């Protein structure tokens, strides 16, 4: 991953550029600043962003109708075709509101063939796990539009893609840089414990469980000792030679009980271990 100084410097550049800052706000689900001086393409971009964030399908359809009338030919100079931010936003609206994607597919065929274009094509067919994707862009789209927990394999792919790219800010594609920063933050936050109440309850349960296992093991152990003492006592009673050596029941019980207790002192721990395994406890402490 790149140094924090480079990240901070770049984000300052993003904040000073309306196109970049609008996209950055968009993928963070925040409404961007609306400029009063926008050309037609920028107006489509701005209106599309706001309609998606407002969940306004009619407003998006109106903005999309302005641009999908344009049908540039191969080789023609049409700047909007190469505007990755605009294309991302339009695809987001088409997927979110389930509109026809024929026009945008034609536009993608006119774009330069690279990982960004490939990612856009795969997003349109719901293929977020393709190895040819730019995983940071795919991650940002999935979080923003799918509104669901992103699959761990996509998180891992995006994270590895980011941390191994030591020249991220040397990339000329701003959409890659912005999506990488957003994806990195999102993945790190998603790996933190968010439901601490449930985790605390789990720790309390384990503490109670282990205490109860110790108590249960001791009870079973003492019962076994009592049965052993009783059995030996009955055996002594049936054997006159042994009975003569024992003055009374108290002496026999005391001596044998103490002897067995000392000899099998570690048996209680083994009983506890067996009980844990029977109940499915792995022995891993939380």
Image (cartoon, helix red, strand yellow):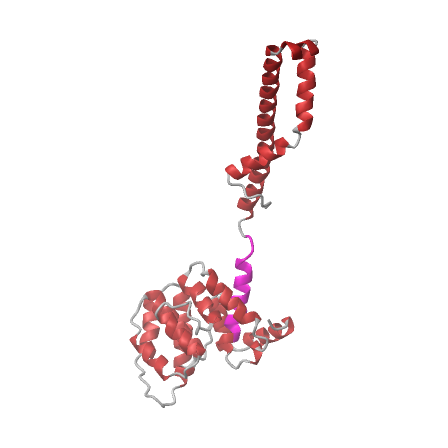
Q: Is residue 181 magenta?
A: yes
Residue 181 in percent (x, y) is at 54, 70
Answer above or below: position of 91 versus 229.
below
Which sits in the foreground, 35 or 141?
Answer: 141
Q: Residue at x 36, y 79 (%)?
A: 108
Answer above or below: position of 218 versus 152.
above
- Residue 227 in sight in this render: yes
Q: Quadrant of residue 128?
A: bottom left
Residue 2 in percent (x, y) is at 61, 73
The residues colored magenta run 177-193
Q: Residue at x 50, y 71 (%)?
A: 179
Q: Residue at x 41, y 72 (%)?
A: 89
Q: Quadrant of residue 133?
A: bottom left
Which sits in the foreground, 264 or 198?
Answer: 264
Which sits in the foreground, 91 or 275?
Answer: 275
Image quarter of the N terminus: bottom right
Which sits in the foreground, 58 or 265?
Answer: 265
Answer above or below: position of 86 versus 139.
below
Residue 113 in percent (x, y) is at 41, 82
Q: Is residue 13 magenta?
A: no
Q: Please, which residue is most extreme toward the front here?
A: 241
- Residue 32 in sight in this render: no
Q: How many marks?
A: 0
Residue 109 in percent (x, y) is at 35, 82
Q: Quadrant of residue 48?
A: bottom left
Decide whether the magenta segment is chiefly helix, strand or loop: helix
């Amino acid at each position: 991953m790149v140094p924090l100084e480079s990240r901070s410097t770049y984000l300052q550049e993003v904040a000073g550029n309306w196109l970049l800052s609008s996209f950055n706000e968009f993928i963070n689900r925040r409404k961007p600043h609306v400029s009063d001086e926008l050309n037609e393409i920028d107006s489509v971009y701005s209106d599309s962003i706001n309609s998606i964030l407002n969940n306004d399908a009619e407003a998006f359809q109106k903005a999309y109708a302005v641009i999908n009338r344009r049908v540039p030919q191969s080789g023609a100079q049409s700047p909007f075709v190469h505007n990755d931010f605009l294309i991302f936003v339009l695809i987001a609206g088409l997927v979110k509101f389930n509109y026809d994607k024929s026009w945008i597919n034609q536009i993608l065929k006119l774009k330069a063939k690279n990982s960004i274009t490939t990612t856009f094509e795969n997003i349109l067919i719901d293929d977020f796990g393709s190895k040819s994707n730019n995983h940071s862009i795919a991650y940002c789209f999935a979080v923003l539009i799918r509104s669901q927990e992103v699959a761990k394999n996509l998180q891992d792919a995006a994270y590895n893609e980011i941390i191994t790219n030591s020249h991220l800010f040397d990339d000329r594609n701003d959409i890659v840089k912005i999506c990488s920063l957003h994806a990195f933050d999102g993945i790190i936050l998603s790996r933190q414990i968010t439901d601490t109440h449930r985790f605390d309850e789990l720790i309390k349960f384990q503490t109670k469980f282990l205490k109860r296992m110790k108590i249960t093991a001791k009870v079973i152990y003492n019962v076994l000792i009592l049965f052993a003492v009783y059995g030996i006592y009955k055996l002594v009673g049936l054997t006159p030679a042994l009975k003569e050596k024992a003055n009374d029941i108290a002496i026999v019980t005391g001596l044998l009980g103490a002897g067995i207790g000392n000899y099998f002192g570690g048996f209680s721990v083994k009983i506890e271990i067996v009980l844990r395994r029977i109940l499915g406890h792995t022995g891993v402490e939380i």
